[in-house]
Image (cartoon, rainbow, N blue to C red):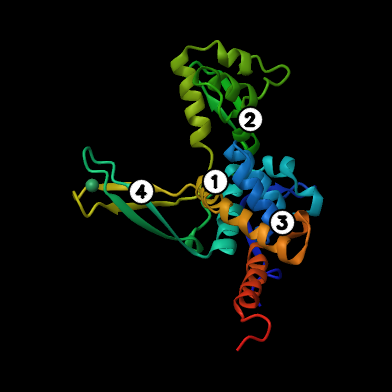
């Protein structure tokens, strides 16, 4: 039977520390339930919405289980790991093949082009051995940093452009280690010329692994070739936002006919909720009171 027993094992590209000096890369996701759908649809910060959704749909990450898989733990993941979890959650909840339409970017065209993406083919990228790195400046000094995490993206989302760079550097550039006069901490990086600063930020971002989810598309209208990039966070959330009105209606029907509480209904997986609705629909469409 479809529904509550489904789960999917996921191999995280990077992983979490396992407490014994290695990285644990195994995780298990279960289908989205109503609570996850609601959180995903209502939280305005998309990166936080993604973590709330994953917290309600991830059974295990490495050695962490149950309540330990919370927004804090998920926020410590590299974005590539979060994206891998979201892609697998999307497959499990909505199916392997996802459809989107995008507007052709050619000037004066704007034709809607259909995109079909098979999420079962998403492969993990090569990942760096460490979540930290070191950049050498031309003058021989260096900058030590850690790769930005999913939690950094939550914190940086929505900051005005003129505060973003400083906030990013403050979070991800490590303080210079004691006795390393040629290493720059965040404050010293902020006092570098702006072009150097921008280059440092660019290199830190370029060092972050990503899932390759680009497709080359052709516009049938004008012949323009362009590149589409599937974004796991925005794609899954836009599906949940679009189906929120339907979710509310479904909760309403089940509460009205079964008298279950709001919380009980939201804890059903999406597929199980729909199975109950199908039963209800069948019952309600049957002729009543033995009428001939
Ligand atoms: Zn076009």
Q: Is residue 134 visible?
A: yes
Tell me the mark number nearer the camera, choosing from 3 and 1.
Answer: 3
Numbered label attached to residue 233: 1
Separation (CA) of disc 4 from disc 1: 17 Å
Q: Relative to 266, is 220 on the left or the right?
A: left
**Quarter the C terminus occupies:** bottom right
Q: Relative to 109, is 123 on the left or the right?
A: right
Q: Residue at x 63, y 30 (%)?
A: 155
Vertical side of 274 occupied by 183: above or below: above
Tell me the mark number nearer the camera, choosing from 4 and 2.
Answer: 4
Q: Residue at x 46, y 50 (%)?
A: 212
Numbered label attached to residue 102: 4
**The residue carrying mark 4 has its beta carbon less than 8 Å from ligand 1:** no
The quarter holding residue 7 reads bottom right
The numbered mark, 2 or 1, whose residue comes first in the sequence reads: 2
Separation (CA) of disc 3 from disc 4: 32 Å
């Amino acid at each position: 039977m479809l529904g509550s027993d489904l789960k999917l094992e996921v191999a995280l590209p990077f992983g979490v520390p396992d407490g014994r000096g290695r990285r644990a890369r195994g995780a298990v996701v279960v289908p989205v339930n109503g609570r996850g759908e609601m959180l995903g649809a209502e939280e305005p910060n998309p990166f936080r919405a993604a973590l709330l959704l994953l917290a309600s749909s991830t059974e295990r990450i490495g050695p962490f289980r149950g309540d330990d898989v919370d927004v804090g733990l998920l926020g410590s993941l590299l974005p590539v790991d979060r994206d891998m979890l979201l892609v697998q959650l999307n497959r499990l909840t909505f199916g392997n093949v996802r459809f989107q339409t995008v507007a052709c970017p050619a000037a004066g065209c704007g034709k809607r082009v259909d995109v079909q993406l098979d999420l079962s083919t998403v492969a993990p990228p090569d990942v760096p051995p460490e979540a930290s790195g070191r950049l050498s400046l031309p003058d021989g000094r260096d900058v030590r940093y850690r790769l930005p995490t999913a939690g950094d993206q939550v914190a940086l989302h929505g900051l005005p452009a003129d505060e973003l760079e400083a906030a990013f550097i403050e979070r991800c550039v490590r303080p210079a280690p004691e006795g390393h006069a040629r290493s720059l901490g965040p404050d010293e990086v902020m006092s570098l010329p702006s072009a150097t600063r921008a280059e440092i930020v660019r290199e830190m971002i370029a060092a972050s692994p990503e899932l390759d989810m680009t497709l080359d598309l052709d516009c049938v209208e004008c012949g323009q070739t362009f590149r589409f990039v599937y974004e796991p966070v925005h794609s899954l959330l836009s599906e949940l936002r679009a189906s929120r009105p339907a979710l509310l209606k479904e909760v309403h029907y089940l509460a009205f006919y079964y008298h279950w509480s709001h919380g009980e209904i939201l804890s059903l997986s999406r597929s199980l909720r729909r199975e109950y609705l199908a039963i209800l629909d069948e019952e309600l469409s049957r002729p009543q009171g033995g009428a001939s």
